[in-house]
Image: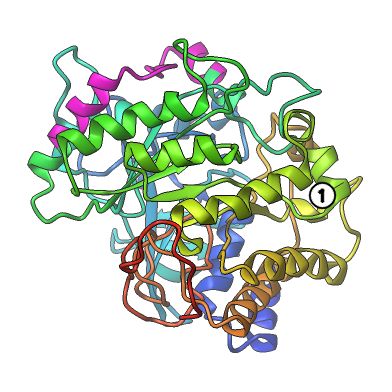
Amino acid sequence: MTGRTHLIESLMERFPHIPREAVIKEDLLRGGMAFDDSALSDTTNEATGGIKPKSYFIFSFDHRTLPELGAAALRRPPEEIVLTGGPYELRRTVVSVRVNPASPYRVQAGPDGTLGLYLDGRRISDVGLPPMPDYYRETLPNGKSVMEVAPTIQWGYLVYLTVFRVCQYFGAKEECQYCDINHNWRQHKAAGRPYTGVKPVEEVLEALEIIDRYDTARASQAYTLTGGAITSKVAGLGEADFYGRYAQAIEERFPGRWIGKVVAQALPKADVQRFHDYGIRIYHPNFEVWDERLFQLYCPGKERYVGRDEWHRRILDSADVFGARNVIPNFVAGVEMATPDGFATVDEAIASTAEGLRFFMSHGIVPRFTTWCPEPTTPLGRLNPQGAPLEYHVRLLEVYRATLEEYGLASPPGYGPPGPGRAVFSVSSFMDSLPATGDLPATDGLPAGEPETAA
């Protein structure tokens, strides 16, 4: 048995209560996957072909830059893959594609032509690819593709609207040290790819009109409005009004069609109220990393403009507007262990993150996390190309579920159904590792501001 196979099987044995699907998924997310030429979509034009290609919807989520990816840059890999079967008898598991040519995991066709995921040369699962949705074959009146303006992820569940493609936290003294949003913008522009900096509201509405027309099965159930932080103005507007105007236009044109979500800074309560007034129903004021020292080091712009303690106060205040259940701050799981400043042991890193989970969950707020991908153009990615140890990610799933159960809370809304074999959230395994219950609505019938009880 080779090294990586031995590691994942030993973790499956040590943590039998963690779905084995989640163990493999976390390893793919933290370390990436390689693609044989037989598994690439051969899609130079994203509106053609039978497979939904990777859209690079906000970050690169790759372990190499576009010039370093070779064929995988010219013939795009799929947006996501779905794993099933194999020797571990995997239930259906949706995984976001993070390309790493050096990964021990490889997607390739077998002797019979069917795609599989291979680890250390052994086929460990069947691989399904996302079919090209009909709406991706359509274009806006100005010729732009739907994928450029309103890509969908999570196997079609979420419309991801990155309406501001750069961040005003800029340069070494302000950019978050794990984030490549600004470089991702630069590399796509340098490659001559369409990558709109500020998406006009009307273009977003036109793209959503096409999605709504062709998505007759209503697979898309939520949209996320997001982009870089705004510290001054964009189009003459501050952050709440800039992002909020998109929600207002969407809700006026398509009332109730999608659950409206926004990823933005932790803003003052009056601005948060404007988000709600514009029609947003779920607010993601991401706290990124819990430890005070690491927050200051890794998020210098957020520390300078807002500060960690004020950021946390604003998260709690926003529950008065949205209801605690609908405030879902994200953290980047794994950066806690990044050298040279992160925790040296898994025990220390887990203890710190658990403290943050208990802080928010004790107030009825359920965070979620994205598994850190060490992109090579970021300071932390360059220093930590292997990311965090897989054991950290497996134990995080354990402590996350235990803390959720301790406070009697349910999985957050707007992420599709939880449970192994059911979850569609693709950039971490937290939904795969939770009990398989129904997908709850965004507000659970609570008016904004009404305090929540344990579910």
In front of the other: 277 or 441: 277
Examine the rendered structure and indicate whether residue 3 appears above or below residue 289: below
Relative horizontal placement of residue 263, taking residue 297 as reference (left or right): left
Helix, strand or loop status at disc 1: loop
- Residue 3, can we see it? no
Horizontal side of 238 relative to 243 (left or right) equals right
Question: Horizontally, is 136 left or right of 341 in the view?
Answer: left
**Type of amino acid under label 1:** Ala
Residue drawn at the location 19% of the way across and 34% of the way down: 252
Residue 192 within the segment the image draws in magenta = yes
Q: Is residue 282 magenta?
A: no
Q: Residues within 10 Å of mark 1 (few under 14, many from 20)?
A: many
Q: Quadrant of residue 112?
A: bottom left
Q: Please tell me in which quadrant of the rendered image residue 172 appears.
A: top right
User: What span is colored magenta in the figure?
Assistant: 186-210
Q: Tell me what residue is drawn at x 56 percent, y 16 percent.
A: 186
Residue 51 visible in image: yes
Measured as percent of width and height from the top left, residue 426 is found at 44, 57
| Residue 77 position within the rendered picture, expressed as x and y whole percent measured from the top left | 40, 41
Along the line of sight, which residue is nearer the eye, 114 or 88?
A: 88
Residue at the spot 64% in from the left edge and 46% down from the top edge: 314
At x 68%, y 76%, the residue is 399
> Badge 1 is on which residue?
338
Q: Main secondary structure of the magenta part?
A: helix
**In x, y percent, where is residue 83?**
39, 66
Residue 419 against residue 117 in the figure, above or below: below
